[in-house]
Amino acid sequence: MTNSNKYLETLEELLNDLNQTNNYHDLAIVDSNLKFYNFEKLLNTDVLYIDISESTKNLASVEKVWNSLFEHNLNRFSNLLIIGGGVLLDVCAFAASTFKRGISFSTVPTTLLAMVDAAYGGKNGFNNDYGKNQIGTFTQPKSIFVCHKLLDSLTEKDYKDGLIELIKHGLIGSSEIYKELSLSSDYKVSFDTIKKGIKIKLDIVSEDFTELNKRKLLNFGHTVGHLIEKDSEFEVSHGEAVAIGIYYELLLSKKHMGLPQEVVTSYLQYLEKIDYNYTYKFSKGKNSIMEALKNDKKSLVDNVDIVLLSDISMPNIINLNFDELFEVIDY
Ligand SMILES: NC(=O)c1ccc[n+]([C@@H]2O[C@H](COP(=O)([O-])OP(=O)(O)OC[C@H]3O[C@@H](n4cnc5c(N)ncnc54)[C@H](O)[C@@H]3O)[C@@H](O)[C@H]2O)c1
């Protein structure tokens, strides 16, 4: 399990913590879009900027990170610091957890999505021809530093992508978070709501770290969401794809679990408020979707374990035949 989880309001507090001797790191790998923070001048460690996006979240990028670890002479006892969004965290955490059979690493999630989801729970990995995050490990970071101030530089679009994972946490585990988001007039959320979202994830992961059962709940919206990301060749972002995936999985919830229509309606109103799409037309045909579905880590031959809601905060893991899923998507 993670040794420490820190919440920091300002950049000064973050840097103060990161520069303490008990948090010593041999190298910090930072998202190249964060160069303007000048971490190389602010941290008492070597800083390397790396450019990885969803379309390059692949083995070639992992190799690039492994090579950098060798070039900086990291050994089995080294500590790595990773500062970035969900993509950089997933790739670098995978590289660290396999380098010389695994070295210690800590993270600073810098997007809302990474703060409320990707940074927690120890999953890492990368995409390949067979789909999203097909190769990876479960390895917990030593520490996670969540700094609210870092969100100020996020684009509105990247911020909203994070809201989708937060509303997902609300739908599966907290009517309070769901209400806060759906009733708020501003799309921005408070640090308190972010902390509540993180708690939902931590509570679920603490009960089922290796996703044998309860952790599957966190995949709400992701069964369809991942199909959309892959079909669009990652033109549709993770947040946008999950937003649509949640809508389709709410429709399935209504049909199979009797979810009240009001929940579907209020979710659609939320997407409208943040100006997000709720439908997607698959472009590559049924066979291609079927292949991608078979590679879903929750699938068997022709069925998949999917999360459906009977109400807000009442999730169930249901086994659906692929054909039942095809009834709601547009292909
Ligand atoms: N491991 C997990 O449990 C888990 C959970 C959920 C999602 N994920 C993964 O997370 C990824 C999506 O993460 P994401 O939405 O953070 O995308 P991302 O990492 O691509 O970041 C989005 C954009 O924001 C930029 N950015 C990052 N921090 C910034 C900041 N503070 N200011 C300005 N720009 C900044 C990035 O450079 C990038 O251009 C997906 O690959 C998804 O599979 C993993």
Image: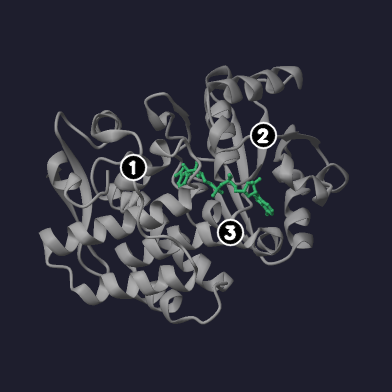
Of the numbered discs 2 and 3, the one sitting upstream in the chain is 2
**Mark 2, secondary structure of its residue:** strand
Which quadrant of the figure contains the C terminus?
top left
Of the numbered discs 1 and 3, the one sitting upstream in the chain is 3
Provide residue 166's location: percent of width, then percent of height.
Answer: 44, 62
Quarter of the image where one finds residue 123: top left
Q: Residue furthest right?
A: 41
Provide residue 252's location: percent of width, then percent of height.
Answer: 18, 57
Query: What residue would you read off at disc 3?
Result: 157
Q: Mark 1: which amino acid? A: Phe
**Mark 1, secondary structure of its residue:** loop
The residues bearing labels 2 and 1 have C-alpha atoms spaced at a distance of 40 Å
Query: What residue would you read off at disc 1?
Result: 282
The residues bearing labels 1 and 3 have C-alpha atoms spaced at a distance of 22 Å
Quarter of the image where one finds residue 60: top right
Please give the count of numbered marks on the rendered protein: 3
